[in-house]
Image (cartoon, coloured by chain):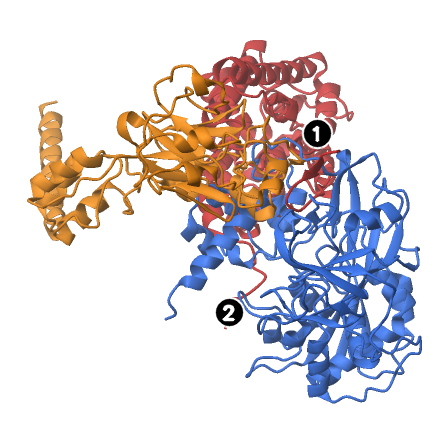
């Protein structure tokens, strides 16, 4: 009996010793020398590993930060300015403040506004659908509604609205990583400046056909009439190929263009309700708002 | 205006679907079911019905109330599992044994992995092995088929040929002595009616099912043939080396779960390789392991264990064995 | 009997229009002649709005090496040059011509005589084929002259004429073989002369015994040309499969057919080559089938390129009530039409009506790992695996498993018992992998 106990203890101790030695040498031999600062930077990162920065993940970003020696080309869209300031602090780098961005869906072609002309019967994927044909509506540029952006989003910030068949961005959750922008084969989603109090003005249409043609396939289309361009006092709105675009770097959120738009293609988000007057206008989103000075 | 469908090609689909395949498997199993009903009567019917009902119910309940997803019992795969499990049990098994076996087969072996197509181990075999390990007495209490061919089967009493041989060998007898003492071990007996689980009494009925499956292109012959081939090879070598100690290849082929296992269990789509060479390696492994377990293992029969062991290698075999490519790499 | 070695499926062949002789369709009032009727760069229009054109007159030059010129199919006035939606609703640069009468350019030999003597030499033949805008009419519409000029270092040994027509329903090639067998043989002889080869094969599937007989009757008059009956199996008409079936050689991965010494041309192309070289007639007409189980009539038509599909459907008896999907091409590889106002192209082979029961996709269920897709794949790939890797965008895995070999024949999806849209995923990921490979710096 004692023998058994002694032998057991002996064998186990010996085994432990041998394995410890092996482990020690292996650890020593295969040790990878790494800059300890990588770990420090990685700890600051949000850890979403979304790839929104252009790197493979947060660790890769940290490595790139340490290697680059500055932050000129590196920015974590998820962490934003706060995280970048912390990284800069930890590394002793300089960092320029960037405007917070948010994803915006530029199509208003809901089931109601944009009638379907055929029924898509393939795999539910925008990529498959767009490589096959123009889409199940008369509009060549609009949202296909198969939800590639929804599956691309790692933060659960995009969902399909079953009523309209269009994706909806949850701006609280959106980190502007750009995954949806890359996933959309129709280039509908754009990252735009979040704006003062999250207020945004944008043309929610990508149709570059002539006004009449565009209008025929979708009631909410931008017809390229140019009224918005004329209304804008800041030279922020321009019409190219029958499609208006609001340059968010110049836009002062005055909403003159919004008021001028005859089809409701311009969307105004998160503005306070405006008293009476223009509240009659059908707005496809948020509360109808009144034009302040531009 | 009428809205037409638009989809990528192909715009046609063949007649194949999962339900149709499972239906073919059930049809292929009918001769074996019929034979077991002839031999064992009401107890065989009870087994099959209980097996099917429990398997289907288990799948239904798990999918509907636990996973809350689309119920797939319509594809008949649970029905096949139920029949196979019933055919793998002694006809005299009590009702609770097959119920427990079915719940284990579907609930543990199939649904925990994600249901049809996702499981690693053959559900019916997991159910059977679970019962064999948990209730060894129940699972080896073989009932004797009613005398059917005129010859009396009493000579082999309540033991299967494999058990009989193994026990006699352990008792010091030689193979020729055992065969001389037991007329029930004749080949005609082994082909048409012998003691064993409900479905394996008649080799001929199982072979009929095999021919049907091949004719309907439900299975490919590689797995079954390579099991037979490797079992014959290994047992042949052993037998030639020492005929007193080892049984002959034909005996090994016609006894135990070899036929049922090689035709219906090892060829289960989900738990077998998908490419020709993978299938051949898989089958060969099963054949070798079966013979080794039978002779050198603790159990008299090894088909179930051999198949389960080889099931575990399937993901690797699928990865390593690629189909014959049409084109070689560019110059 | 010969056939290709790996995979393949057996769809029901439904050659309903096999006995309908080729009829001439009326000339359209307005012809929409697309500038992208071939693989490669669009053609560049050389006419202007208001110009008067004749039938057969050049209206656009080839836009590059892999491109083809386009000729007018009607006589009349150019009304517009600009985008018109094609059958999938995408905009394509198109010359719109309003028809007045039917005046042909006078260089075209419009007599019905068969011209047997080949007067041009190899270089002139290729030049003529190029000028006449002949493209492959088997589906890919690859410019024929490019195929007939093997790149340096490659030597053609055989010409193979593709008379397999393995797609269900399609009968246009069959009708051409039945009605113009000698023209096909002469067309083959012309291309053999152009390539400088002495062996020519015409592969025809054994479900067309009369065509085999009709073509076979000319074997003795044209030494070197042999009709090869093939065992019916889809996709026999795939270029790689046909070469394998006829001469038993395999085109290497990412390689061209010429690597096996073979040049493959379709029956329609062969007729176009005959007409171009012997009759000096540019490619502005095509043969197409209007068919379907629910179709009001089974028809084979000779159409002028640029005729709106809706006009053809109307002429053939209208779109049937039961049709839920209209295809251009066969049911295995054809394109679903979402815009019936689109015009026909050089390569248009059919208008096919399918019923809901035939074509509506069933709900996808779980993969049961049956391996039927692997057995069906004529390229020896594992479609189930490519689908699985494709869904998670594992580009390296896809390349390792040779997604680039896929010929998009649809056998895997046709055979899948779980109704998984395998090819939908594989096709899109194949395109992505090809782009990655193409952009990779060469070692």
Mark nearer the viewer, 1 or 2 = 2
Q: Position of residue C327 (x, y in %)?
A: 74, 47
Residue matched to label 2: B330
Q: Earlier in the sequence, mark 1 or mark 2?
A: 1
Q: Position of residue C358 (x, y in %)?
A: 76, 38
Using a 10 Å C-alpha cutoff, classify the residue at mark 1 as few (fewer than 14 neighbours), some (14 to 19) or many (20 or more). Answer: some
Q: CA distance from mark 1 to mark 2?
A: 44 Å
Q: Quadrant of the N terminus of chain C?
A: bottom right
Judge by depth and name the residue closer to the eye, B299 or A142: A142
Q: Chain of mark 2?
A: B
Residue matched to label 1: B23
Of all residues shown, which one is farthest toward the left? A92
Q: Is residue B211 left or right of residue C296?
A: left
Q: Which chain is orange?
A: A
State whether residue B131 is above or below residue C39.
above
Q: Is residue B296 left or right of residue B83?
A: left
The colour with which the image depicts chain B is: red
Q: How many marks?
A: 2
Judge by depth and name the residue closer to the eye, C189 or B164: C189
Q: Which chain is blue?
A: C
State whether residue C33 is above or below residue B132.
below
Q: Is residue A142 visible?
A: yes
Mark 1 in CB contact with mark 2 (< 8 angstroms) = no
Q: Provide the secondary structure element on which disc 1 rests.
A: helix
Q: Is residue B279 visible?
A: no
């Amino acid at each position: 009996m004692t023998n058994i106990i002694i032998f057991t203890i002996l064998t186990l101790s010996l085994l432990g010793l041998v394995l410890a030695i092996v482990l020690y040498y292996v650890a020593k031999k295969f040790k990878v020398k790494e800059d300890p600062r990588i770990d420090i930077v990685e700890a600051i990162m949000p850890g979403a590993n979304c790839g929104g920065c252009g790197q493979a993940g947060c660790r890769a970003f940290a490595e790139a930060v340490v290697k680059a020696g500055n932050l000129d080309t590196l920015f974590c869209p998820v962490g934003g300015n706060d995280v970048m300031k912390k990284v800069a602090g930890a590394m002793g780098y300089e960092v320029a403040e960037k405007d917070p961005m948010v994803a915006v869906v530029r199509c208003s072609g809901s089931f109601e506004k944009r009638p379907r002309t055929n029924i898509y019967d393939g795999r539910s994927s925008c990529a498959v659908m767009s490589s096959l044909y123009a889409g199940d509506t008369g509009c060549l540029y609009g949202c296909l509604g198969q939800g590639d952006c929804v599956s691309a989003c790692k933060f659960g910030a995009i969902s399909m609205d079953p009523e309209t068949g269009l994706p909806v961005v949850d701006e609280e959750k959106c980190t502007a990583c750009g995954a949806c922008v890359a996933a959309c084969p129709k280039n509908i989603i754009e990252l735009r400046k979040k704006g003062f109090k999250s207020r945004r003005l944008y043309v929610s249409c990508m149709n570059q056909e002539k006004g009449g043609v565009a209008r025929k396939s979708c009631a909410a289309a931008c017809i390229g009439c140019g009224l918005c361009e004329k209304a804008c006092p800041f030279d922020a709105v321009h019409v190219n190929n029958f499609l208006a675009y609001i340059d968010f770097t110049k836009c002062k959120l005055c909403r003159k263009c919004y008021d001028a738009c005859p089809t409701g293609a311009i969307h105004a988000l998160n503005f306070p309700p405006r008293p009476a007057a223009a509240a009659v206008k059908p707005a496809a989103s948020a509360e109808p708002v009144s034009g302040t000075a531009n | 205006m009428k809205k037409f469908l638009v989809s990528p090609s192909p715009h046609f689909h063949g007649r194949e679907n999962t339900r149709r395949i499972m239906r073919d498997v059930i049809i292929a199993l009918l001769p074996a079911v019929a034979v077991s009903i002839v031999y064992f009567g009401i107890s065989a019917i009870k087994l099959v019905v209980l097996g099917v009902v429990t398997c289907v119910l288990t799948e239904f309940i798990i999918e509907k109330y636990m996973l809350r997803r689309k119920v797939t019992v319509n594809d008949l795969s649970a029905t096949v599992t139920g029949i196979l499990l019933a055919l793998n049990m002694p006809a005299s098994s009590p009702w609770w044994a097959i119920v427990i076996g079915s719940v284990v087969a579907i609930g543990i072996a199939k649904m925990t992995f994600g249901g049809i197509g996702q499981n690693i181990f053959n559900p019916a075999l997991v159910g059977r092995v679970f019962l064999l390990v948990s209730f060894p007495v129940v699972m080896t209490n073989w009932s004797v088929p009613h005398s059917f061919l005129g010859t009396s089967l009493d000579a082999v009493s309540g033991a299967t040929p494999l058990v009989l041989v193994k026990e006699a060998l352990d008792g010091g007898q030689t193979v020729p002595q055992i065969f001389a003492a037991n007329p029930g071990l004749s080949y005609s007996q082994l082909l048409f009616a012998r003691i064993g689980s409900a479905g394996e009494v008649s080799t001929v009925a199982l072979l009929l099912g095999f021919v049907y499956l091949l004719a309907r292109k439900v299975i490919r012959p590689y797995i079954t043939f390579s099991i037979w081939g490797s079992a014959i090879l290994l047992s042949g070598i052993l037998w030639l080396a020492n005929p007193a100690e080892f049984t002959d290849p034909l005996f090994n082929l016609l006894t135990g779960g070899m036929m049922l296992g090689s035709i219906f269990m090892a060829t289960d789509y989900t738990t077998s390789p998908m490419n020709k060479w993978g299938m051949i390696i898989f089958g060969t492994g099963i054949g070798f392991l079966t013979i080794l377990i039978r002779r050198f293992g603790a159990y008299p029969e090894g088909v179930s264990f051999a198949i389960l062991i080889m099931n575990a290698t399937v993901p690797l075999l699928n990865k390593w064995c690629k189909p014959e490519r049409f084109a070689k790499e560019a110059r | 009997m010969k056939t290709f070695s790996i995979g393949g499926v057996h769809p029901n062949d439904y050659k309903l229009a096999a006995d309908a002789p080729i009829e001439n369709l009326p000339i359209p009032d307005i012809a929409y002649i697309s500038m992208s009727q071939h693989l490669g760069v669009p053609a560049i229009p050389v006419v202007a709005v208001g110009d008067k054109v004749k039938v057969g007159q050049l209206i656009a030059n080839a836009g590059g090496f892999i491109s083809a010129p386009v000729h007018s199919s009607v006589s009349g006035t150019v009304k517009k040059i600009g985008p018109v939606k094609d059958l999938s609703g995408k905009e394509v640069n198109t010359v719109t011509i309003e028809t007045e009468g039917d005046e042909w350019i006078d260089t075209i030999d419009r007599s019905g005589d068969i011209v047997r003597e080949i007067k041009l030499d190899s270089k002139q033949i290729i030049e003529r084929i190029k000028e006449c805008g002949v493209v492959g009419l088997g589906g890919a519409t690859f410019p024929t002259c490019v195929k007939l000029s093997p790149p340096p270092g490659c030597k053609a040994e055989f010409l193979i004429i593709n008379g397999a027509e393995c797609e269900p329903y399609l009968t246009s090639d069959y009708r051409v073989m039945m009605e113009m067998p000698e023209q096909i043989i002469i067309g083959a002889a012309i291309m053999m002369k152009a390539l400088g080869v002495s062996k020519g094969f015409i592969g025809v599937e054994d479900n067309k015994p009369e065509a085999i007989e009709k073509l076979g009757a000319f074997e003795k008059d044209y030494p070197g040309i042999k009709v090869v009956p093939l065992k019916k199996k889809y996709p026999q008409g795939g270029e790689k499969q046909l070469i394998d079936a006829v001469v038993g050689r395999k085109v290497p991965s990412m390689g061209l057919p010429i690597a096996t010494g073979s040049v493959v041309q379709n029956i329609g192309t062969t007729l176009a080559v005959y007409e171009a070289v012997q009759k000096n007639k540019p490619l502005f007409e095509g043969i197409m089938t209007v068919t379907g189980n629910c179709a009001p009539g089974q028809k084979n038509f000779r159409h002028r390129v640029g005729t709106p599909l809706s006009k053809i459907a109307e002429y053939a008896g209208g779109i049937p009530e039961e049709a839920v999907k209209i295809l251009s091409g066969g049911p295995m590889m054809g394109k679903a039409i979402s815009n019936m106002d689109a015009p026909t192209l050089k390569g248009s082979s059919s208008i096919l009506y399918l019923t809901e029961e035939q074509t509506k996709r069933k709900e996808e269920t779980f993969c049961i790992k049956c391996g039927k897709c692997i057995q069906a794949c004529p390229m020896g790939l594992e479609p189930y695996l490519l689908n699985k890797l494709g869904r998670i965008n594992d580009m390296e895995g896809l390349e390792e498993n040779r997604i680039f070999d896929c010929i998009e024949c649809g056998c895997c999806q046709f055979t899948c018992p779980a109704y998984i849209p395998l090819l939908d995923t594989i096709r899109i990921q194949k395109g992505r992998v090809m782009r990655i490979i193409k952009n990779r710096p060469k070692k």
